[in-house]
Image (cartoon, helix red, strand yellow):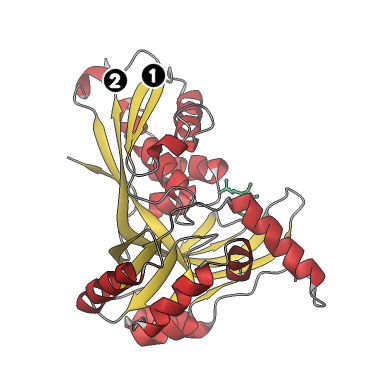
């Protein structure tokens, strides 16, 4: 009886992500946009604990937890169901999700919980799934789930789910400025389409590749070099839907960030700093300026979804 192995549950920690480069191309036949992106996992983490249960249930805690559905609309629920179906076991688990990653914040919070759920349920149910098998399920669930499973730094192509690890040395220090509202990812992509259709150039079919300078900076652990290459094609769309982000980004620059960028589809802003000390100082200054709900200091790259004992 595998369930008896874990009466106290299986606890999994999973990181948020920032996109160091997010090149967005045209819409594919399946409705997704072609991406060329470089992800970095940061140590702002959610925890998912999977307990033995008689059916599938989810509870969520943390800021804005009440805005997260605790049913089949939750990607973690779908992750548990998909794994159970493929492993031919009953989808019986109680998932407790402790959220620190902002909800609808552009940091892959929902995808992170799905990745953690795959790892936790595979262990709880003793499915003997290999990491590549879990990665395959992750890719089916969503564009960012596979990266949350992998962690570290990686190049993502396709709709973001085809991953290749990227060599990165050292530690990069970020200040994350969290907003008191969320942005819907589909709405930001729709705004991206609208902005590009109304511009004379139209949407390029291929997403712009990451510049070599970005890979050089990561390989060398060169924070200043990395600051010069950060790019997010979704930023104009996020700012168009949430113009207050302009003030947040400007404040970060004025207060000493090496660079600032909207994280993914936003509205979280990610500011790169030269050290942990600079990050702590910037976080306090941004909070005092009242340009965001709250700030978090985080470092990257961080590990992907993993069991904590
Ligand atoms: O795959 P995921 O569920 O994270 O994507 C959320 C939404 O973001 C999609 O339904 C789609 O509207 C948009 N998206 C996109 N192209 C991508 C990734 C996401 O258009 N490559």
Q: What residue is rendered at 58% in x and 50% in y?
A: 184
Relative depth, front residue between 99 and 132: 99
The answer to whether one can see residue 205 in this image is no
In-image side of 242 versus 284 (left or right): right
**Quarter that holds the C terminus:** top left
Which of the marked residues, 2 or 1, is nearer the chain's N terminus? 2
**Quarter that holds the N terminus:** top left
Coordinates of residue 78 in the picture (x, y in percent): 50, 31
Q: What residue is rendered at 41% in x and 82% in y?
A: 253
Residue hosting label 1? 92
Label 2: how many Cα within 10 Å (few below 14, some 14–19, many 20+) = many
Q: What residue is rendered at 36% in x and 41% in y?
A: 116
Alpha-carbon span between mark 2 and mark 1: 7 Å
In-image side of 193 versus 171 (left or right): right
Q: What residue is rendered at 40% in x and 63% in y?
A: 292
In-image side of 193 versus 44 (left or right): right
Residue hosting label 2? 52
């Amino acid at each position: 009886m595998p369930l008896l192995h874990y009466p106290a549950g299986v606890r999994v920690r999973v990181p948020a992500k920032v996109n160091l480069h997010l090149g967005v191309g045209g819409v594919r036949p399946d409705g997704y946009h072609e991406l060329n992106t470089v992800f970095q996992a940061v140590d702002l983490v959610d925890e998912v604990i999977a307990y033995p249960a008689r059916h599938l249930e989810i509870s969520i805690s943390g800021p804005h937890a009440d805005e997260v559905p605790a049913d089949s609309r939750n990607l973690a629920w779908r992750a548990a169901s998909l794994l159970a179906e493929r492993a031919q076991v009953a989808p019986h688990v109680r998932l407790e999700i402790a959220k620190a990653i902002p909800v609808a914040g552009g940091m892959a919070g929902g995808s992170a919980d799905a990745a953690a759920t795959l790892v936790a349920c595979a262990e709880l149910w003793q499915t003997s799934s290999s990491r590549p098998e879990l990665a395959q399920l992750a890719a089916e669930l969503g564009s960012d789930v596979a990266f949350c499973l992998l962690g570290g730094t990686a190049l993502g192509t396709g709709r973001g789910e085809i991953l290749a690890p990227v060599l990165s040395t050292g530690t990069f220090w970020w200040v994350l400025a969290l907003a008191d509202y969320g942005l819907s990812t589909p709405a930001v992509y729709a705004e991206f389409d609208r902005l590009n259709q109304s511009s004379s150039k139209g949407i390029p079919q291929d997403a712009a590749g990451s510049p070599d300078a970005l890979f050089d900076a990561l390989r060398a652990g060169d924070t200043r070099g990395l600051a010069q290459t950060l790019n997010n094609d979704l930023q104009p769309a996020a700012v168009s839907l949430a113009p207050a982000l302009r003030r947040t980004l400007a404040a970060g620059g004025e207060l000493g960030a090496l660079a600032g960028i909207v994280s993914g589809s936003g509205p979280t802003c990610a500011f790169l700093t030269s050290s942990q000390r600079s990050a702590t100082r910037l976080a306090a200054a941004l909070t005092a300026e009242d340009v965001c709900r709250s700030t978090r200091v985080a470092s990257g790259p961080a590990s992907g979804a993993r069991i904590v004992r």
